[in-house]
Amino acid sequence: MSTIKEVAELAGVSIGTVSHVIGGAVRVSEPLRRKVLAAIRTLDYHPNHIARSLKTRKTLTLGMVVPDMTIPFFPQVIRSAETAAHARGYSVIAVNSDDSPARQKEVLSLLRSQRVEGILLVIASGHGSQAQIPKLIESGIPVVCLDRLPDGIEVDSVCVEDSAAAEMGVSHLVELGHRKIAILTGPLTLRNERERLRGYKLALEKAGIAVTESLVWEAKLDQEDVSAMCREHLTHSAKRPSALFCTNGVTGLGALRGMAACGLSTPEDIAFVTFDEITAEDIFRPAITSVVQPAYEIGFRAAEILIERIQAGPTQGPRIEARLPATLKVRESSTGATAVRVLRSGRR
Amino acid sequence: MSTIKEVAELAGVSIGTVSHVIGGAVRVSEPLRRKVLAAIRTLDYHPNHIARSLKTRKTLTLGMVVPDMTIPFFPQVIRSAETAAHARGYSVIAVNSDDSPARQKEVLSLLRSQRVEGILLVIASGHGSQAQIPKLIESGIPVVCLDRLPDGIEVDSVCVEDSAAAEMGVSHLVELGHRKIAILTGPLTLRNERERLRGYKLALEKAGIAVTESLVWEAKLDQEDVSAMCREHLTHSAKRPSALFCTNGVTGLGALRGMAACGLSTPEDIAFVTFDEITAEDIFRPAITSVVQPAYEIGFRAAEILIERIQAGPTQGPRIEARLPATLKVRESSTGATAVRVLRSGRR
DNA sequence: CTGTTAGCGCATTCAT
DNA sequence: ATGAATGCGCTAACAG
């Protein structure tokens, strides 16, 4: 790996001049410029980003923490954040927290050591994953939370309109005539899960249906746990709901497995609606009615907001809370019909 | 962000001493040690990885380039590579190349500037994506290629046993009685696609079936292109094959869409086998018979090999070419039966 | 327009 | 066992 010094020697100029042609900010005469460029090419020189960062105190790097990038929603978000960042000259380092607060703490520490200029954070679902956010912000690292929002912490955020989106999904079931509708959520320590639950209750209330606590099922974000919970609740046909609403893709898939284990199918035995698309719904049966989040836009907006924060400096501008509308894709699992219908959520 | 100097001042020691307690290599007396640790905590000090790297010339970072992390296979590989790397004290920076050689060149350059110590590379499918590998290696950055292998380039690699895996999938169709079997591949500029095609031909030859070139369909790694190609080949029932084998998840899903567009379904009209699982096959119908790659192990092994290379120094050890066995999951799309059967590929 | 130089934060000799 | 000094590669004044 050659250095700027070697380039300077080969080109017969000073390292300052080389730096100038690389930076582009200071004018350099054409002949020298060409010589420098030639030297760079023959040496296959790549500026040492490490040294540059040390000097400029800018890494042009964003950190991003997600619970598990094998969950299909997250790669979409990462990719769009990367796209937005790249357009502004930033790179993104994406890491998994395994949905563990301890591991999240580790990776955040690592990201700080790497001197990322800002962090895109999808918090882990366990307890204590929020405590680290204020320290980050105090230390001058802007944070934007995505998808999962922390509680009572002043921080920029972007996510779907959780409550409205859930309400839309549940109202759809209500309109179909269902009155005994269960909801299967992830940990209610997560604010967005609580918001989605709130949307569920709102939908029922508007329809004049009483909320039955025994139809609110809270599971861990774990296939096995979700599946077991479903089996438990669904075995007795008397207590069985006529419809089930799941608040995310993981619980949605787990619920389908649990239902299958009970010999139940959708929509015949139970009408089914879930957050997130969990397969290629145009190809596979049953096609699942889904509340679809604008994953691409969530990541893109989050990166935009973060970079604006970084470039604005330690200014205490107003907190930004972007809430994006979801789309309801009505399919077979709720209506029994094969045609697809698309609805858009909007603020009331 | 506090510095080592501030820690030293607060603790009332020299920066050398602070560095020693952080590094752990040099012994420091217990009283001073405690004072330093306390200072670190109260200042919320995070060692500047940038400065450290500049000094030590080690970044403890691996770069990883994949075509598109929204393709489900890749997040698995990234995650397992990250796991292996982390266990050895390394971080992984994963970036997308958009399957474009130009973009791949950019991100590789960026990774070099970041001074990653090694690179895990899944090459882009376009022309010229291989040319950059020798330059990397010459410049002292070890490279391990995964999944997609370059041609005629000496480089460590790990992937599935492409030919044997494809042969297993096609032989399965042969055993089911099919004699007119089409294969839908990605770009044959990719060696692994050619290998999979070779496995297809091998399976046919062993069964005494002549290879018909009109049944070899080469598509771009793009849903639309694949789908269009299928529609074109499948409209005339006379020329239609009785079975179709797809060499990867993208072409597999595209083919299913193309078939649906022609009003064809599997397994009724066409028996179907594909590389990679493309949905939750236990839940959705039709359940697709798949040649499953050991994604986790591929990423893990690749990271292991890369780190060994890094730590061995510029030693020219023998090239490593890990070839991992695939698994055939026999499902409804080929047999029509709902039961699942699992076969393991092995070297002949 | 070009060259010289002073650090950025840290690990690491080398003295003490 | 501790501290002072050096330099990693680079950018950004500044001087010429």
Image: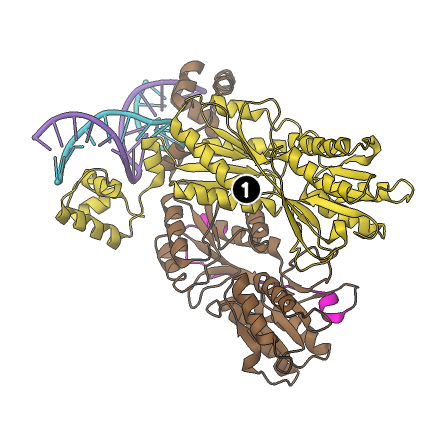
Chain colours: A yellow, B brown, C cyan, D purple
From this viewpoint, is residue A342 visible? yes
Query: Within the magenta stretch, is there residue A301?
Result: no
- The x, y position of residue B132, in whole percent, is 37, 58
Between A157 and B108, the residue placed more toward the observer is A157
Number of labels in the image equals 1
Local crowd size for mark 1, using a 10 Å CA cut-off: few (<14), some (14–19), many (≥20):
some
Q: Would residue B320 be counted in the magenta stretch? A: yes
Residue at 52 percent of width and 42 percent of height = A297
Q: Position of residue A26 (x, y in %)?
A: 20, 38
Residue B97: percent from the left, percent from the top? 45, 53
Given residues B313 and A277, the one toward you in this image is: A277
Quarter location, residue B277: bottom right
Q: Which residues are magenta?
A: B308-336
Secondary structure at numbered mark 1:
helix
Chain name for mark 1: B
Q: Is residue B340 left or right of residue A33?
A: right
Disc 1 target residue:
B86
Above or below, comparing residue B55 to residue A40 in the picture: above
Which residue type does callout 1 highlight?
His
From the viewer's perspective, tell me whether residue B299 is left or right of residue B51.
right
Residue B60: tell me if it is visible: no
